[in-house]
């Protein structure tokens, strides 16, 4: 007998990936400018109360920028691009709007996305599993009663699926709104599905 259940939860944490991308005529100049920009970003984050353990580098790259004078000319290096991204974890989702505002004011010109997270997702998913088993038993009792038999013990339980929507990406338009005013994250559901085999008497 298949049992299904869901548990509702509101994301209480957030994770944001942001950084700075720039170009210069030499790799050294591009790196120097990028380092200076990221120092301002890190200082702004710390001023907001973000601990160093909640900031980690997600990617750093230095690459030549190629171009052709015309279609018949070989490509040549015209500049160097540097990109540095940092992942910031917020224990309080309410700070998200303020952090987006701080980042843009500090010069971050690259925001790859925001993920909304549920901190106690494991505990909630266990609750959904229990409810799913209860749903399977409820259905089995109905069928057993209709068939004139008695429901016995559980012979087998197989989890078919568990869906935890703890990493919903926020669209760019939502991020723009969050930078201006607080935005509700909305309620998300953790869904569980199990297959339970019962004995009958």
Image (cartoon, grey):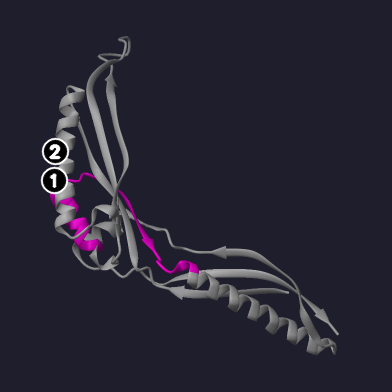
Q: What span is in magenta? A: 96-122
Residue at 28 percent across and 53 percent down: it is 53
The x, y position of residue 76, in whole percent, is 27, 15
| Residue that mark 1 sits on | 40
Residue at 47 percent across and 63 percent down: it is 165
CA distance separating discs 1 and 2: 7 Å
| Residue that mark 2 sits on | 36
- The answer to if 16 sits in the magenta stretch is no
Q: What is the number of callouts on the image?
A: 2
Quarter of the image for the C terminus: give it: bottom right
In this rendered view, identify the residue nearer to me: 200 or 102: 200
Q: Say whether marks 1 and 2 touch (CB < 8 Å).
A: yes
Tell me the tag on residue 28. Answer: none
Depicted 161 relative to depicted 18: above or below: below
Secondary structure beneath label 1? helix
Q: Residues within 10 Å of mark 2 (few under 14, many from 20)?
A: few
The x, y position of residue 90, in whole percent, is 29, 61
- The answer to if 99 sits in the magenta stretch is yes
Secondary structure beneath label 2? helix
In this rendered view, identify the residue nearer to me: 108 or 172: 108
Depicted 77 relative to depicted 148: above or below: above
The x, y position of residue 124, in whole percent, is 49, 72
| Side (left or right) of 29 relative to 115 | left
């Amino acid at each position: 007998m298949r049992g299904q259940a869901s548990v509702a939860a509101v994301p209480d944490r957030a994770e944001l990936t942001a950084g700075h991308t720039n170009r210069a005529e030499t790799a050294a100049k591009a790196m120097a400018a990028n380092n200076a920009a990221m120092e301002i970003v890190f200082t702004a984050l710390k001023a907001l109360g973000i601990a160093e353990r909640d900031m980690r580098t997600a990617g750093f790259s230095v690459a030549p920028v190629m171009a052709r004078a015309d279609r018949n000319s070989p490509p040549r290096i015209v500049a160097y691009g540097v990109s540095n991204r940092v992942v910031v974890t917020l224990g309080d989702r309410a700070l998200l709007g303020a952090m987006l505002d701080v980042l843009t004011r500090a010069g971050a010109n690259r925001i790859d996305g925001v993920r909304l997270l549920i901190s106690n997702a494991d505990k909630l998913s266990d609750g959904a599993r229990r409810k799913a088993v209860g749903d399977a038993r409820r259905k089995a009792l109905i069928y057993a009663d209709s068939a004139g038999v008695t429901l016995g013990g559980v012979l087998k339980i197989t989890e078919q699926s568990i869906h935890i929507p703890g990493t919903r990406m926020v669209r760019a338009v939502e991020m723009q709104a969050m930078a201006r005013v607080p935005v509700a994250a909305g309620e998300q559901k953790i869904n569980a599905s199990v297959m339970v085999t019962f004995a009958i008497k």
